[in-house]
Amino acid sequence: MESPRSEQDRQVERVFFASEAEFRTLVDASPAIIWFINTAGHCRYINRSYLEFFGKTEEEITGEGWHQLIHPDEAAAYIATVRQAVRERTSLCSRSRMCRHDKQWRWIESHGRPHYGTSGRYLGLVGHNFDITDNVEGTRILRESEERLRIATEAGQIYTWEVDEASRAIHHSPNAARILGFDPPQDYAGKAGLLHPGDRAAMVAAAERAVREGTDFSQEYRVINPHTGEILWVRSQGIHKGEPGKSRRFIGVAQNITARKRAELNATFLARIGDDFSRLCSATEIMRVVGEKVYRYLGLSRLTFVNINKTVDEVTGAYEVHEPGVIDCKLAYKLQGLISENCCQQLQAGHTVAIDDIETDPRTAHNAEAYRPFEVRSQLLAPYLSNGRWKFLLCAQHRQPYRWRADEMELMRELTERIYIRLERAYAEAALRQSEEEFRAIFEFSSVGKAQADPATGRLIRVNPKLCELTLYSADELLGMQIHD
C-alpha cells in the first residue's frame, strides 16, 4: 500500500500538467491541502481544503499572508527554507507547527517541487501540506515512554536477556555491561564460569530445568566480576516464547540487587553485634569478640580500636585483630606521622575517610614509609566524636590497594558509634565495680566502727567487724537494729 503523501505528490503533478482553468477546478476538489508559490516567494494559489483547514480566506493567505500561520518559534527557519527551495529550484520537505481553524497548533509537513510552464519556464514551487500531528505526538509519547523506561531500568539496575534454546547463545541488552561492570558472557559455559561457587550448582540446575520443562525461571544468585573480583548479587526472571517442540526463545530481565543484599547483610550483621553487646561485659571482651567478627566479615588484614588524645596529638591502639605474622601496632603514634593535616581535619569533623591506596593518596603518600612495616596499603578510618571532641577511631586496613564501597563506609560509621558507646558503658561499669570494691575494703578493714543504715527506715544494713568488736554484738544481731538502739 502506498502512503498518502506519495499519492498526493502524484496528484499535484497531474494537476499542474493541466491548463490553469483545469488546475483551479481540480485543486479545489482535492482533499489534499495544495498550494503554489511563485518565484518571488508569494503564494499564488491555494485550494478549498487549505482554506477550510486553516480557517482563512484566500485574501488572507495570498502573497505573504501564509506567514501568519506558522508558529513564532519556527516561522523564521521555515520561511527561509521555503525561500531557499524557490530560489534554488529544489524540492522542499520541511515541518513546522501551524495554527488550524480551531486555534490549535498542528504539526504540518510540507512537500513541494519545482513547477515549470509548458514553455519550460520556471514558475515556482507547487506542493501540499500534510497534518502529521498524530505521528509527532505518537513519536513524542513513545520517546517519553522509552525515556521513562530507561530511567526506571537504570535506577532499578535492570537489563534484559534472551537465550536461543537451539544454539544456547545468550544476548543481553546494551546496558548490561554498565550495570554489572563487565561484559556478560554470550554463552552458557562462560556465564556459569562467573557464578559464585556457592551458587553455581543450584543456578545451573534451575536454568537447565526451566529450559528442559519449558517452565518460567526465577532465581537469585551471585556472580564474580572477572576484572575486580567483586561479588555481585543478581535476581533473574524469565519466560518462554514459542511452541513446545519448535525453536523457542527464553527471554527475561535481570536486576543487580547487590546494594539491597549488602544492606540486608549489613543490617543482619549489626543485629548480631547487638546481641554480643548485650552479653559481653568487659571492654576487652567486647573488643576481642566484636573485633574478630568485624575483621572476618569485611575480609580485612587488620582492624584496630584506636583511642585519640588530641591534646597531645597522639593516637593509641587499644586493641587489634590482624593476620598472623604481621607487626602489632598497639602503640602510641603521632597523628602527623601518619596522616595529613587535611585528613586530620576531616576526621575531627566526624567524616569517615577512605584511603584506597596509601602510596598514592595525597593524605597519606607523604608518610607512606611509616605504613610499610605494618604491610598496609589501604585503610578506612571511622571516627567517633563525643560532645564535639574526637575521642575514638575504628581503623580497617587491607594489605593491597582496595576501593572501599559506600556500604562498607556506612557500616563502619555505624559500628564505630555502637562500639564506642558500648565501650564507654563497659568502662563506666568497670570503674563503678572498682569503686565499690575499694569502698568495701575500706569499710571492712577500717579501725573505726562503721555501719550503713537504710535511709528510709533507719535500720542497719551493713556493719564492719570493728563495730561488732566495740558493741559486743555479732553482725547478725546488729543488722536490723535501729541506729538509736
Image: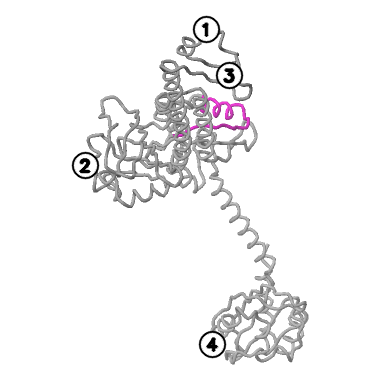
Q: Amino acid at mark 2?
A: Glu
What segment is highlighted magenta in the picture? 202-223
Q: Is residue 108 left or right of residue 273?
A: right
Marking on residue 483: 3
Q: Are marks 2 and 4 in contact (CB under 8 Å)?
A: no
Q: Which residue is mark 1?
A: 474
Secondary element at image label 1: loop
**Distance of label 2 from label 4 (alpha carbons):** 77 Å
Give x and y (percent) for residue 345: 36, 51
Residue 48 in the image: above or below residue 444: below
Tell whether position 205 is magenta. Answer: yes
Q: How busy is the neighbourhood of tag 3: few (under 14 within 10 Å), some, or many (20 plus)?
A: some
- Tell me, yes or no, whether the two marked residues, 1 and 4, touch with CB atoms within 8 Å: no
CA gap, disc 1 and disc 3: 15 Å
Q: Nearer the viewer, residue 158 or 375?
A: 375
What is the quadrant of the C terminus in the image? top right
Residue visible at 63% across and 37% down? 242
Give the residue pinned by disc 2.
369
Q: Nearer the viewer, residue 444 or 200?
A: 444
| Residue placed under numbered mark 4 in the picture | 87
Disc 4 residue type?
A: Arg
**Amino acid type of the residue tagged 3 in the rendering:** Ile
**Hey, what amino acid is under mark 1?**
Ser
Question: Looking at the image, do the residues carrying marks 1 and 2 touch, with CB atoms under 8 Å apart?
Answer: no
